[in-house]
Image: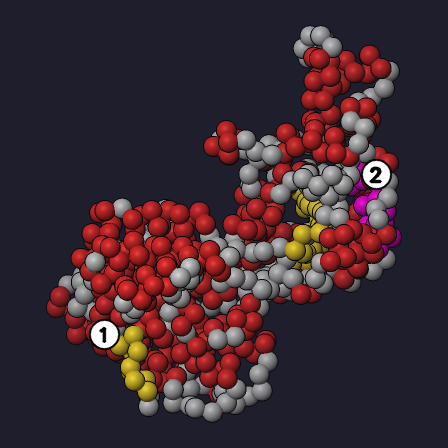
Amino acid sequence: MSTLITDAVTQLSFALFENKGVFALLLGSGLSRAAEIPTGWEITLDLIRCVATAQGINAQPDWAKWYHDKTGQHPSYSTLLQELAGSSHERRAILHRYIEPTEKDREEGRKIPTAAHRAIAELVRRGYVRVIVTTNFDRLMENALHESGVEPTVVASVDALSGAEPISHTACYILKLHGDYKDARILNTDDELSAYPVEFDRQLDRIFDEYGLIVCGWSGEWDHALRAAFLRAPNRRYPVYWTARGSLANGAGRELVSHRRARVISVIDADSFFTNLLGRVDALEQSQRQNPLSIELLVRSVERYLSKSEYRIQLDELFTGEAHRLLKELDAPEFDPTKLFDQKDFQHRVQKYESITEPLARMVGVLGRWGDDNELPLVLDIINSLYRHSEKIGGGMQPYLNIRSYSAVLVFTAYGLGLTRSERWPALHSLFTAAISRQHKAPRKVVEELFLWTWSGIEQKSWWDQIDGAGPRRTPLSDHLLRIFEEWGKSFVGLSPDFELMFERFELLGSLAHLEQQRPTEIQAELDAGNAAWVPYGRLAWHSQNRKKLLGEVRSEPVKAALTKAGFARRDPAFVGLFISNFERMIGRLS
């Protein structure tokens, strides 16, 4: 019988996509190889070299052969480590120099997260993977997760296990079977690896029973305790995929594959495998969107009508028609706010809002990138129409009522990102400070109603924590919008060397526009009292690397002059410094 799916990677990508959080990763030392963190065998040979050199032995072409000739034994990482260091503290110190990157290592890209680590972190961020079991001492996986905005629960000792929150409550759970290289309780020797603590065995049994597995970087040959855990897992509730460079040659690995009926995937390396897997999941995500061809036609039409002034009427009609279509779709029964609240239904509604708003949002993004400021009233009319439509229904479940204006948020964000990309600072400031007409209430500025934490839809952070299946996060709405616009922005951002930096620049300028509502004397009084005036914040609250870059950018005289001339910071360069001081103080207090 023929089948459409003939390769294991395609099968795995479908399994991941359709079963968020069902698969755990089992990662071995091979994952970190591309980061030039040595394997146990390489450390063994280097230890032999160091000992021999200390004894006055000249360099040898084959240290393994030299050791065998000298001792009559094959080189053993465990034996050498035991001979060189009598305690776990000493062994940790020896390992430290093999794993901790120096300044030169960082500059040359060694001992830092690889493409595989970053792809895994992205899968975790989107909720496809939540559990990682690893034999690695290094912190490359944790560093990659932090860079993606995910705060993992790391268990590297029995003490940590007893105090850790349950797996089901975490965004990401990392079980470091051999410990952490900065902890004296790391496991290295054969004796130490012959059996795990009972608590670790119990946790492993649960993971191997309740989750599917993706094995990468572990041959199955070493670590008797891990092999034993693998072999005693009787349940085959979910499948196991085992990656191997070439064929899985050794008998030990074949035994484990046979026991769990694992499907072997031949890979070149971990980087290409996880990058490829993430790309296929991306493709499946995109297949759930509206017809991309019809969206592209609309975007191309906007670009064509913008090219000549005589097409202004057609451009207006195109946007008016698309806005009316969206408003009609927003009245669909599936958006009924009176239904009983359910997290899965909440997630479905968010996805549906995005699907039906995408065409108009991408069209508006083109206006932001290539317009000439004459389109600003049209965009503001659209945003106001979407917002007023969200107020038509006043009764129902609060979570559903609060996100009825999500389409307005998406359109506002798309236009703002287009303006940021083209550095149209006056129009961007006008967008942030434009009035939103509210039913039975006084108007408020866009930056006070639709920007990050000012938007009512994020009133309960927990509603958004699970949107991408990643669990609790510091800035869930901001992170989700970044993921959405990384794809949508391809229509209007063009070739951007760092989309993330541009997105966070937009957020920072929104925070600046929001602070302008307060008098400088009031802000200074807060600072003098050791406090800070609150402003809505995005990913820069935790993304310190880009925060440093962007605050430095705003401090620079050319940028400061351009922003104040455009209306930002009350047109006062001194206010920029006040904003930076306040922003840094507020972020520090949040941390």
81 left or right, relative to 170:
right
Res 21 → quadrant: bottom right
The image shows residue 546, relative to residue 512, as above or below, that is above
**Circle nearer the N terminus (1, 2):** 2
Name which residue type carries label 2. Answer: Glu
- Residue underneath mark 1: 378
List x then y, in percent, for residue 137. Answer: 69, 40
Q: Dot 2 surroundings within 10 Å: few (below 14), some, or many (20 or more)?
A: some
73 left or right, relative to 425:
right
Q: Is 75 within the magenta?
A: no
In this rendering, the label closer to the viewer, 1 or 2: 2
The image shows residue 6, relative to residue 82, as above or below, that is below
Residue drawn at 56 percent across, 56 percent down: 150
400 left or right, relative to 218:
left
Residue drawn at 29 percent across, 53 percent down: 577
268 left or right, relative to 47:
left
Res 524 → quadrant: bottom left
Q: Secondary structure at mark 1?
A: helix
Question: Is residue 243 in sight in this rendering?
Answer: no
- Residue 516 is marked as none
List x then y, in percent, for residue 168. Answer: 69, 65
Q: Which residues are magenta?
A: 219-233
As measured in the structure, the alpha-carbon distance from the residue carrying label 1 to the one carrying label 2 is 69 Å
